[in-house]
Image (cartoon, rainbow, N blue to C red):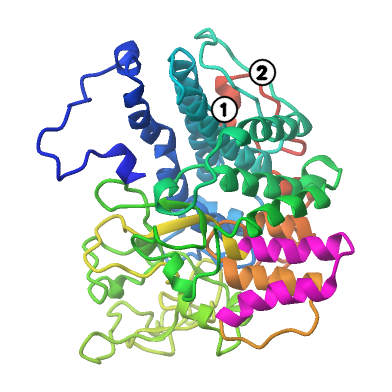
Amino acid sequence: MLGIVQPSCTKLEEEVYSDLTGELFFEDPDNLIYAFGAAYTNLYWLIGHKYGMVGKEAGTDLLVVPQRGGDWFDGGEWHRYHRQTWTPDEGYISFWWNICYEGINKCNQLIDQFKGVESETAPIAIAELRGLRALYYYWLIDLYGNVPIVDRFDYPADYKPTTNSRQEVFDFIETELKESMPLLSRETGMPIYGRINYYAASMILAKLYLNAEVFTGTPKYAEALNYCDSIIQSDGYDLEANFFNNFIGNAVNSREHILGLPFDQVYAQGFEVHLFTLHYSLQSKYEIQSATWNGICAQEAFFNMFDSTDLRRNGLLFGKQYDTQGVQITDPSYEKFDPLNPTKPRDPDGAGLNLTPNVNMLEPNCLRQCGARVAKFPFIAGSDRYMSNDFPIFRYADVLLMKAELLLRTGGDAGEAASLVNQVRARADVQALSTVTFEDILAERARELYAEGHRRSDMIRFGTYTEARWEKPDVSPEKVTLWPVPAAAIKANPNLTQNPGY
């Protein structure tokens, strides 16, 4: 992506494009590639923000943002998120809606402009933009269900779309991808990294069909299986030997990324998981230039899902923390005994920083040192507000686990399903399973894909999302499997229909 949108620094006589706008910009077909950056830019904010892919899993059984005294109350939004008692006014509810539609609007604008360009590459560019637009709509159908389909840029200024049904949105995504795929590149690796190619579109369709019974009431597992097979049989992807090579800065050589997002702390900003998760006292250890926030962490039950030998557990930071000299780091503001308030929790570890997997409560006084932290994306020394790690929107391990699930759902070869799961487990250095159940696959998806934004839809598909769990004593009503349409969106457009129950 950065190679697309940035001129090469080795060329000293670059043509300047900053003054080219409108029709002039698109008169030269060679300029088309420079426009793609604008279509993908929204992904950085959408994926990397605290409300993004990592933060989205705070509403599941994996991660949590507890209130640590005066920190992270945030009007109670994270409490409501954890307990699934949100309202249409929540920040994260509006965030995903707004950013997805901003991305769709930019795709529509560029598609409209490319239609006026006489070039052999224009239809290819339009196909890629339709694929990207379908990805935004996939997230919308998953989160909100019934949303307006806006597929043009030339609507009147006062146009206010009505809500389309979830079935209509499903059909739109399916059609857009199938019509676009014949023109999409089947190339993999660096030349197409960070862009929608044939296999990224196949992955969106596989996800769409995998969740079709949730989305429309009609299962399409066989169709999902076909698209998983098309990715596997392409020979363009494979498991990385090292699990963590998928999450480093500059993971462009990962054979596992089907669609990766290359963040950069200067040129492609937005990834702030290091601030979101690290304890305040760990800022200096990791040479982070901005203050860390001591927020999101793993729930204890999730931490306990890992075998002690599971290499993926190293993506959670826990236990006593030491500086580079081997001296234990301290937390000067740890919770001391308060004789005036004996009910206030006291940290038994004292000042020595010890990130305990146990999280003593959701609110109001979770201890500052509680919770294993999200370290799946290695902390890059010298990072400021943002880190330069790459983020895998889709990767090959997910395809293997999806196919294993689909084999069970379609009555396929159970032995092959176990073999697929064991490929993923072998890399993590955990014992192979002789057979796999749906429960095994859901648990394996948690261990493999945590903090990548898949857990919510997984739990809904497996029927566990609304169940009671830690600090969520009640079974949630079925309505929470959809988020409400944001109140601000309905205020701006009264033609929108609110989801049932909100």
Q: Residue at x 76, y 55 (%)?
A: 225
Q: Main secondary structure of the magenta part?
A: helix
Q: Quadrant of residue 172?
A: top right
Cα–Cα span, label 2 and label 1: 10 Å
Residue 437 visible in the shown view: yes
The reply to whether the magenta stretch includes residue 181 is no
Q: Where does residue 21 sit, x and y in percent of width and height?
A: 29, 17
Q: Which residues are magenta?
A: 398-427
Residue 76 visible in the shown view: no
Left or right of 338? Residue 237 is right
Q: Which residue is mark 1?
A: 489
The reply to whether the magenta stretch includes residue 417 is yes
For badge 1, the amino acid type reads Ala
Q: Where does residue 137 sit, x and y in percent of width and height?
A: 61, 36
Q: Which residue is mark 2?
A: 495
Q: Residue at x 64, y 80 (%)?
A: 305
- State the residue lying farthest toward the right: 411
Is 497 rendered above or below residue 379? above
Which circle's residue, 2 or 1, is located before the other in the chain? 1
Count of picture labels: 2
Characterize the local packing of mark 2: few (<14), some (14-19) or many (20 or more) Cα atoms within 10 angstroms.
some
Is 161 rendered above or below residue 409? above
Q: Quadrant of residue 248?
A: bottom left
Q: Where does residue 433 sit, x and y in percent of width and height?
A: 74, 84
Q: Where does residue 486 sit, x and y in percent of width and height?
A: 59, 34
For badge 2, the amino acid type reads Asn
Location of the C terminus by quadrant is top right
In terms of depth relative to the viewer, which is nearer, 473 or 457?
Answer: 457
Left or right of 286? Residue 107 is right
